[in-house]
Amino acid sequence: MFSNKEKKNSQEQLEKEALDPQRIPNHIAVIMDGNGRWAQKRHLPRVVGHKQGMEVVEVITKAASNLGVKVLTLYAFSTENWKRPVDEVNYLMDLPVKFFNRFVPELISHNVQVNVMGDESKLPKKTQVAVHNAIEQTKSCDGMILNFALNYGSRTEIVEATKKIARDVKDEQLDESQINDEIFAKYLMSEQLHPYNDPDLLIRTSGEQRISNFLLWQIAYSELVFTEVYWPDYKPQNLYEDILKFQQRNRRFGGIKA
Ligand code: FPP
């Protein structure tokens, strides 16, 4: 007889084997939603959901890296999340500290490099230090990039890029006639992820079907997958299923079917 754990592992293995290893998305972005509802369903404080969400980040990072994903972008804190109660914001700001303290050696052993996109200057000092240390400690890892969107908002990113372009035109570093999609993209924070600036697959958990100011420029041709699963319940098996959905799509980038 198989134990439940063995059954779960073999099911997970089957889901993994159903994937075409040649068509693993290079860049996966995730809106990790549903932490609060996961906790409320269990009559627990919302922050317990965030804590469990952090554990899931660890598991999904390893699963994505093992599949050969090149960039995993996780929406950890949006520019709008400051509107939450101060205790919850403080807890969320402490999570990168907890996460990196515990998980950096394992990231290194998986050859994962940490990157952060967002306005770091507004983060508490302890969060900034944790982030900078993690970036520094993993900078020579050349496997998957684990890219945290932290105090990130896409409209701000686009406005800031536009300001920089305007300055460069004014300073005659750039001619207006040169500005096109490719040049514009170089001014966005996602240029740090080159050549995988744009997600191939965007996943949002928890049943919500919106983008919430996340990577608005970069997802122009991403495949979108919305899953009912709350982020704290998200398992490698869910990741494999969502990648399978991606592989079953026919990406045309505005062209016609090959
Ligand atoms: C949205 O769920 C989730 C967040 C705003 C925070 C996401 C953060 C994590 C999953 C942990 C990140 C870990 C590290 C290492 C930085 P919600 O609270 O809006 O859920 P709800 O819609 O059910 O209320």
Image (cartoon, rainbow, N blue to C red):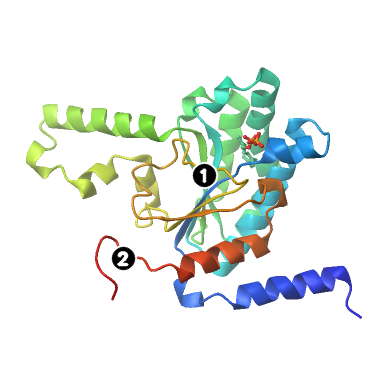
Above or below, 98 relative to 139 = above
Q: Residues within 10 Å of mark 2 (few under 14, many from 20)?
A: few
x, y percent for residue 66: 60, 67
Toward the bottom, the furthest residue is 1
Q: Secondary structure at mark 1?
A: loop
Q: Residue at x 72, y 51 (%)?
A: 233
Residue kind at label 2, given as amino acid type: Arg
| Mark 1 lies on residue | 209
- Position of the N terminus, as image quadrant, is bottom right
Q: Residue at x 56, y 23 (%)?
A: 82
x, y percent for residue 148: 53, 43
Q: Quadrant of residue 86?
A: top right
x, y percent for residue 10: 75, 76
Q: Residue at x 29, y 34 (%)?
A: 161
Q: Residue at x 46, y 41 (%)?
A: 211
Q: Secondary structure at mark 2?
A: loop
Toward the top, the furthest residue is 86
Instruction: Work out how far the residue at label 2 is from the one at label 1, CA to CA, in angstroms.
Output: 22 Å
First in sequence: mark 2 vs mark 1: 1
| Mark 2 lies on residue | 252
